[in-house]
Amino acid sequence: MRIVYLLEDTTISAAARVTMAQADALVARGHRVRIVTKGLPVTWRGSQAEWIYVDDFREFVADADERVADPSVLAHWIVDDEVYRTGTPREHDPPRVLLGDAEGYGAVAHASWFHQKLDLIRVSPFAPSRDEPLDSVQEFHVALTAPEMTRLLHSCDVLVAPAPGLLAAEAMAAGVVCVSPPRAETSAVDLGEQLIEILSDAALRERLRAQGRETAEQWRSKRVVETLEAFFRSPE
């Protein structure tokens, strides 16, 4: 098959990461994939796709036999094989808690107020804003490449994820315990209470790691690419 993705920007984002991961998985299966973008050449991740750079998507005309990827395709996350771990090294003391979203600061603050000892590790595509409570952060990582992000995940014990997303999927694959809302509307206090429970219970952390690894198997590239192939072969 011949497939085209339209990628608005090439800066580090979930959309860019998923687009390139899907493209690589499809290329590995023998498909021709082109990524058309208004962004700059990518330096933070390798890619097996063909790249076309335009100022306006209207400049690009797909070939008659090419299928242009619908935006809904990006709902199919792929976790790189390098992220998966079958075992987890000894936990850190204090535990390293990863935060990928500023909305999680409240949960961490709540846990810290109740005397939970932890090292807070913040990761973001952007430099910290003035609103970031940097006095509570032990490490702040900006615009990590894909290999750097994998190494950081493997160095952490817990992820606070106020909303589901690609980072949470990667954390589960890496055997990192995810603190995530049990329902759509969850307060910082509720999330903080969940973090306290997880930090206080080693047996619970082990169960959650096992459950997370099992869940993450659905995002293996081999499984996802089969779903993508079925999608692209279906009538438009």
Image (cartoon, rainbow, N blue to C red):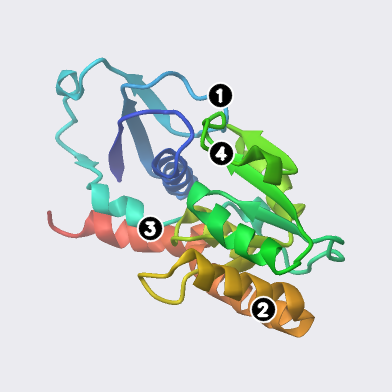
The residue located at (52%, 31%) in the rendering is 129
Toward which corner of the image does residue 117 lie, by quadrant?
bottom right
Toward which corner of the image does residue 227 lie, by quadrant?
bottom left
Query: Viewer-nearest of labels 2 and 1?
Result: 2
Q: Which of 127 and 228 lies nearest the eye of the viewer? A: 127
Q: CA distance from mark 2 to mark 4?
A: 25 Å
Q: CA distance from mark 1 to mark 4?
A: 27 Å
Query: Viewer-nearest of labels 2 and 3?
Result: 2
Q: Which mark is residue 43?
A: 1
228 vs 30, left or right, is left
**Which residue, as the protein is rendered here, is positioned at the far front?**
113
Q: Which mark is residue 132?
A: 4
Give the mark nearer the N terminus: 3 vs 1. 1
Identify residue for label 3: 76
Q: Which of 134 and 168 lies nearest the eye of the viewer? A: 134
Helix, strand or loop at label 2? It is helix
Query: Viewer-nearest of labels 2 and 4?
Result: 4
Identify residue for label 2: 197
Picture coordinates of residue 195, whole percent (x, y): 63, 70
Query: Viewer-nearest of labels 3 and 4?
Result: 4
Query: Viewer-nearest of labels 1 and 4?
Result: 4
Give the mark nearer the N terminus: 1 vs 4. 1
CB within 8 Å, label 3 to label 1: no
